[in-house]
Amino acid sequence: MTIDELGQALLALLKSTAAGIGKIFRFAGDLLIDRASSSGPALPSNSLKLFSDITANRIVFFVFAAYILFINIFTFINFAADKSKAKRKEMRISENRLMLLCAAGGAAGGFIGMKGTRHKTQKKKFSIGIPLLMIIQIAAYCFVLGFLGFWAFF
C-alpha cells in the first residue's frame, strides 16, 4: 500500500467519521432541546454547571478528542506524503496547506511528521512556527479536555 492509497483510505475514514459526528451533534441537539422543553427540575440559579446533561457533555468531550486525534494523524500523513513526493520529484503538497493543517489543530502531528521524515526542518517557518503552535495547542487541549472532562465525568 502506497502513501497515496493510505491517504485516500484515511480521507474516506475521515469523511465517514465526519458524517457520524454530524449525526452525534444532531442527536445531542435534539436531546438538549427535549431536556429544555421538558418540565423536569430546573438547575438552581447559582449553579456553575454549564451543561445539565451528562450524556451531551460526554459526546462533546469524545468528539473533541476524536478531532484532535484525526487532525494530527491526517497532518502527519500529509507531511510523509509530501516527503515521498519530493523524493520522486512529483507534484508536491503546498507549504500553505501543511501550515493550515498545523494551524487547524494538527501541530503535534506536523511536528512528528517533520522530525520523523526529516522534512521541512531547514525552513524557519516550519522549524519555529510548528513547535510554537504545538506548545500553544497542547496547552489549549489540556485546558479544554480537562474542563470538558470535569463536566462530563464528575
Image (tube, helix red, strand yellow):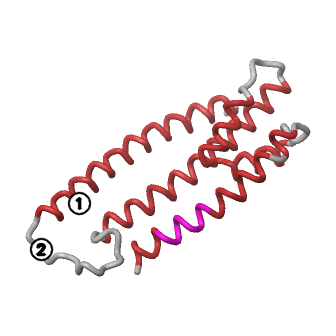
Q: Residue furthest front?
A: 46
Q: Is residue 142 magenta?
A: yes
Q: What is the x, y in percent for residue 77?
A: 68, 40
Q: Which residue is mark 2?
A: 40
Locate residue 50 relative to residue 138 in the image: left or right.
left
Image point (70%, 35%), residue name: 98
The amino acid on which the numbered mark 1 sits, given as a three-letter code, is: Leu
Q: What is the x, y in percent for residue 138?
A: 66, 61
The image shows residue 84, relative to residue 118, as above or below, that is: above
Q: What's the magenta bit mostly, secondary-structure-wise?
A: helix
**Picture quadrant of residue 38:** bottom left
Q: Quadrant of the C terminus?
A: bottom left
Disc on res. 32: 1
The image shows residue 91, relative to residue 31, as above or below, that is: above
Q: Residues within 10 Å of mark 1 (few under 14, many from 20)?
A: some
Considering the numbered disc 2 on the image, is that residue within a helix, a strand or a loop?
loop
Q: Residues within 10 Å of mark 2 (few under 14, many from 20)?
A: few
Q: Residue furthest right?
A: 122
Mark closest to the chain's N terminus, 2 or 1: 1
* Front position in the image: 41 or 61: 41
The image shows residue 20, relative to residue 78, as above or below, that is: below
Q: What is the x, y in percent for residue 144?
A: 52, 64
The image shows residue 22, relative to residue 56, as above or below, that is: above
Image point (80%, 33%), residue name: 83
Image point (65%, 37%), residue name: 100
Considering the numbered disc 1 on the image, is that residue within a helix, a strand or a loop?
helix
Q: Which residues are magenta?
A: 140-147
